[in-house]
């Protein structure tokens, strides 16, 4: 395998990378009549490591 580092599509120069990598607005989740999440907004900036923590069955995957 002879891949060139110059052709790596995941590499970007600093100026063309967005400041926000993930943006969520108005997230909601219900289970039947129970609201688990209502109108959550968040931004995850470039270079930030984020983890979702909570007990089993708390809806992290959802």
Image (cartoon, helix red, strand yellow):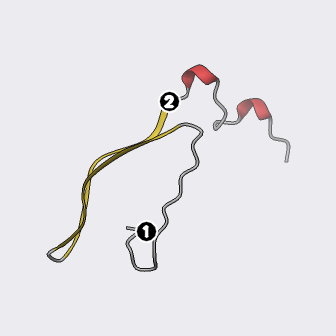
Q: Determine the residue positioned at 48% across, 61% down.
A: 52
Q: Of residues 41 and 13, which is closer to you in this image?
A: 41
Nearest the camera: 1 or 34?
34
Residue lying furthest top? 15
Q: Which residue is mark 1?
A: 61
Crowding at dot 1, Cα within 10 Å, few <14 / some 14-19 / many 20+, comes out as few
Q: Secondary structure at mark 2?
A: loop
- The label on residue 31 is none
Residue 12 placement (x, y as % from top left)? 63, 29
Which badge, 2 or 1, comes first in the chain's sequence? 2
In the rendered view, does 3 fall on the left or right side of 46? right
- At x 80%, y 35%, the residue is 4
Q: Quadrant of the C terminus?
A: bottom left
For residue 18, the mark is: 2
Vertical position of residue 48 compared to residue 32: above or below: above
Q: Residue at x 58, y 48 (%)?
A: 49
């Amino acid at each position: 395998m002879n891949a060139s580092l110059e052709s790596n599509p995941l590499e970007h120069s600093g100026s063309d990378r967005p400041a926000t990598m993930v943006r969520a607005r108005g997230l909601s989740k219900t289970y039947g009549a129970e609201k688990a999440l209502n109108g959550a907004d968040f931004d995850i900036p470039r270079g930030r490591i984020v983890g979702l923590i909570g007990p089993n069955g708390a809806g992290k995957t959802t």
